Image (spheres, grey):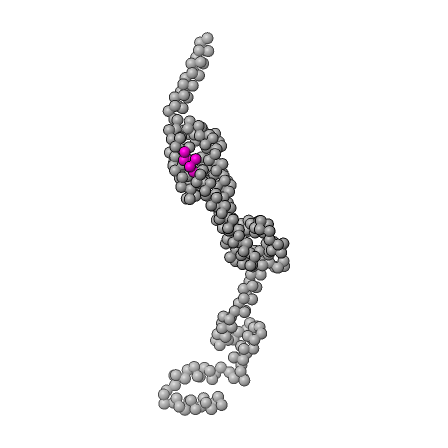
Amino acid sequence: MSKKNSSKTMWSNVFRSAIVCVGSTRWKRASKCKNLIMQFQAQLVNQKNRRHSIIKHSKLDIAQLLQFGNLEHALPRLEQLYKDTCLLDAYNQIENFCKGIITNLSDISICSFVQDLPINVAIAVANLTFTASRCGELSLLHQIRNLFRERYGVEFDFINVELCAGNLVDFELRKNLSINVVPEDEILKLFSEIAQDLNFPLGFKALKQNFNPQFHSDYDGSDQKPEVMNDEMYRDVWSTSPMSYEVGSRRSSSSKDTSPMKGDNQESCSNRTTSEGMNRTPRMSIAYVDDIDEDDKSVNQEKRLGYWD
């Protein structure tokens, strides 16, 4: 009997202490947090509608650029379209986390330590905290983050914001909010989606096979590497550029060029260097005529005129 009484006394003390702890740690700002989250959900809906509109108009603009073959200007817009799409996906994830917090707000109100929270609730709190540090346009989310930091401490906030070891931030949300370089396959995927959504002809859809965002050039299906094609492209542009002729003439006047030249460039260069069997000595004498004394200028001028005749 004594053992039974002692065990009952022990369990009663445990329950009593648990009730005292629950009563003392109940979150007084739970109702304020709930109201802020509900207001934030309305703000998030507006941001989602705005992002939907931006994506829709971006697709139309990109479609017009691609129809005219303006790939150079379409590439940055495709990259921005991918970032906007990822941001919209992040908004959808945030909306789900908000619903989870409102549903389980009683757990947040009771548990003053994040370790005592159900894992799904702790993940939702961590992801809202992380999102508040990445999305400045979501102003109400910053107030919610301050409430969670007050509730669960600065260390929990720092671990999830800075993505330290032990953070609970969802990988997909982290990826959608931390895009620095857009993968090439994602660009081509968006290209194909735009072609399908806007019902482009098959001939236009086939352009995605020739579209190479990295080099901004069309690929003709050959086995050449893109780097080689890029070099040849620049050589072709350089050979037809007016500046190439100017540089070629300057080089020929200063030194002999041993590299072969094409077309009229070779003939003009040969005419400048060896016209009618003349060497460059008379040109050099004319260049230094200012060094001759003034008394001998007239004599030297007559000699030069006779030489040129």
Residue 49 visible here:
yes
Q: Give the dominant element type of the magenta stretch: helix, strand or loop.
A: helix
Q: Position of residue 170 (x, y in %)?
A: 49, 38
Q: Residue furthest top?
A: 1
Residue 243 pos. (x, y %): 49, 70
- Vertical side of 16 occupied by 43: above or below: below
Q: Is residue 20 above or below residue 236?
A: above
Please report the residue visible at 41 percent of the width from the left and 35 percent of the height from the top.
Answer: 36
Above or below 269: residue 148: above
Nearer to the camera, 17 or 202: 202
Does 147 sit above or below residue 309? Answer: above
State which quadrant residue 228 falls in: bottom right
Q: Is residue 36 magenta?
A: yes
Location of residue 46 by image quarter:
top left
**Residue at 55% of width from left, 49% of height from top?**
190
Residue at 62%, 54% in the rendered image: 201
Q: Position of residue 42 (x, y in %)?
A: 44, 38
Residue drawn at x 40%, y 39% is 140
Task: Find the magenta span and give its range.
Answer: 35-40
Q: Is residue 160 visible?
A: no
Give whichever of 299, 135 is nearer the camera.
135
**Left or right: residue 206 compared with residue 54:** right
